[in-house]
Amino acid sequence: MDPIQAVRERFGWLAYSEAATKKMIELVPDERWSFAPAPGSRTVGELVGHLYGDELSNWKAFQLGGLSEADHRAEAGPAVKSKSEAFALLARAHARRGEVLGRLTSAELERDVKMFYGTFKGAQVAGFVYDEHWHHRGQLTVYLRCMHITPPFLYAG
């Protein structure tokens, strides 16, 4: 399969299954954005901010060929404090994802992208975005359960 098409199909699946992530965010009570399941853990707002803020940052690094740690932090932004902030961040991340995937080239997938924690091929950076979503969505599932909220079915597209 064409590598560009493979990446687009992979993210097509993520877009479909991300309906459950959106439902999870919707289930977070307004007063629980500062909830953390244990000392030293991220709060719900930090977790959701990281999930979509890092997606924004990683796509920016993908587009530019790299990003410093300071630029990464600025692009990723702070923790979110509400559903409206979470959905606004999600919308920005989705817009950038669509921009990148819509213009994706083989050269971008093959080139080096210099991140503050190492140098990776563009295809690996795209893979980070994909894998990080699943990883942090799994955490969000646990957070909901710790708040005695039943998470939605995973494939609730």
Image (tube, rainbow, N blue to C red):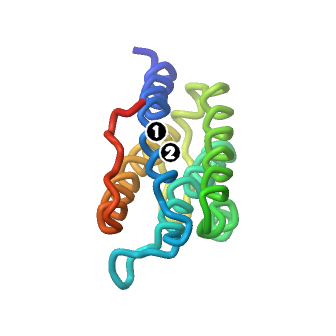
Q: Residue at x 59, y 69 (%)?
A: 79
Rendered location of residue 37, percent (x, y): 34, 75
Rendered location of residue 116, percent (x, y): 55, 64
Rendered location of residue 21, percent (x, y): 45, 45
Q: Amino acid at mark 2?
A: Lys
Mark 1: few/some/many CA within 10 Å (<14, 14-19, 20+): many
Residue ID for mark 2: 22
State how far apart marks 1 and 2 are (Cα): 6 Å
The answer to whether 91 is drawn above or below residue 143 in the figure is above
| Residue lying furthest top | 1
Identify the element where label 2 is drawn.
helix
Mark 2: few/some/many CA within 10 Å (<14, 14-19, 20+): some
Quadrant location of the C terminus in the rendered image:
top left
Residue ID for mark 1: 18
Please state which of residues 49 and 131 is positioned toward the viewer in this rendering. 49
Quadrant location of the N terminus in the rendered image:
top left
Pointer 1 with pointer 2, Cβ within 8 A: yes
Q: Residue at x 34, y 50 (%)?
A: 151
Please state which of residues 9 and 125 is positioned toward the viewer in this rendering. 9
Q: Amino acid at mark 1?
A: Glu
Please state which of residues 155 and 79 is positioned toward the viewer in this rendering. 155
Identify the element where label 1 is drawn.
helix
Please state which of residues 152 and 59 is positioned toward the viewer in this rendering. 152
Q: Is residue 28 left or right of residue 78?
A: left
Rendered location of residue 84, percent (x, y): 66, 56
Q: Nearer the viewer, mark 1 or mark 2?
A: 2
